[in-house]
């Protein structure tokens, strides 16, 4: 497990431990799992899917995964 924080300029959307986060990257969709290599990516319109079942619709954003922490700043 790792910690995920997903927020907008208006506040927190999600914060907590997760097993998986599926993201709509600007050059293609990808999944972050525990022990993923550090990454920074822009996000395009689509769905963020947390633990294969919780969906968050976004217009765009950015994500950073480093160590055991994922932080995404998105626009809805």
Image (cartoon, helix red, strand yellow):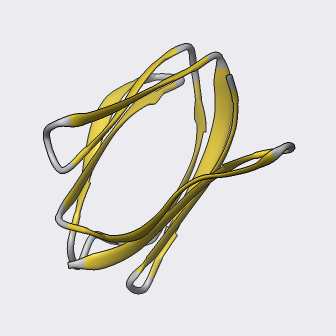
Image: 44 above or below 16: above
Q: Nearer the viewer, residue 54 or 67?
A: 54
Q: What percent of the width, then of the height, locates residue 26?
A: 54, 23
Q: What percent of the width, then of the height, locates residue 2?
A: 30, 78
Q: Is residue 9 left or right of residue 44?
A: right
* Residue name at image x 13 percent, y 40 percent: 52
* Residue name at image x 17 percent, y 65 percent: 19
* Residue name at image x 67 percent, y 50 percent: 7
Which residue appears farthest toward the right when viewing the image? Answer: 9
Q: What percent of the width, then of the height, locates residue 23?
A: 38, 36
Quadrant of the frame with the C terminus? top right
Residue 32 location, quadrant: bottom left
Q: Is residue 10 left or right of residue 48?
A: right
Q: Is residue 30 left or right of residue 61?
A: left
Residue 3 location, quadrant: bottom left
* Residue name at image x 16 percent, y 36 percent: 53
Q: How many marks?
A: 0
Q: Nearer the viewer, residue 10 or 67?
A: 10
Which residue appears farthest toward the bottom when viewing the image? Answer: 67
Q: Is residue 61 left or right of residue 41?
A: right
Image: 41 above or below 38: above
Image: 60 above or below 22: above
Quadrant of the frame with the N terminus? bottom left
Q: What percent of the width, then of the height, locates residue 47?
A: 40, 22
């Amino acid at each position: 497990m790792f910690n995920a924080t997903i927020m907008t300029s208006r506040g927190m959307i999600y914060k907590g431990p997760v097993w998986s986060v599926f993201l709509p990257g600007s050059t293609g969709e990808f999944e972050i799992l525990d022990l993923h290599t550090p990454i920074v990516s822009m996000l395009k319109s689509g769905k963020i899917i947390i633990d294969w079942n919780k969906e968050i619709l976004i217009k765009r954003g950015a994500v950073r995964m480093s160590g055991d922490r994922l932080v995404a700043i998105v626009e809805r």
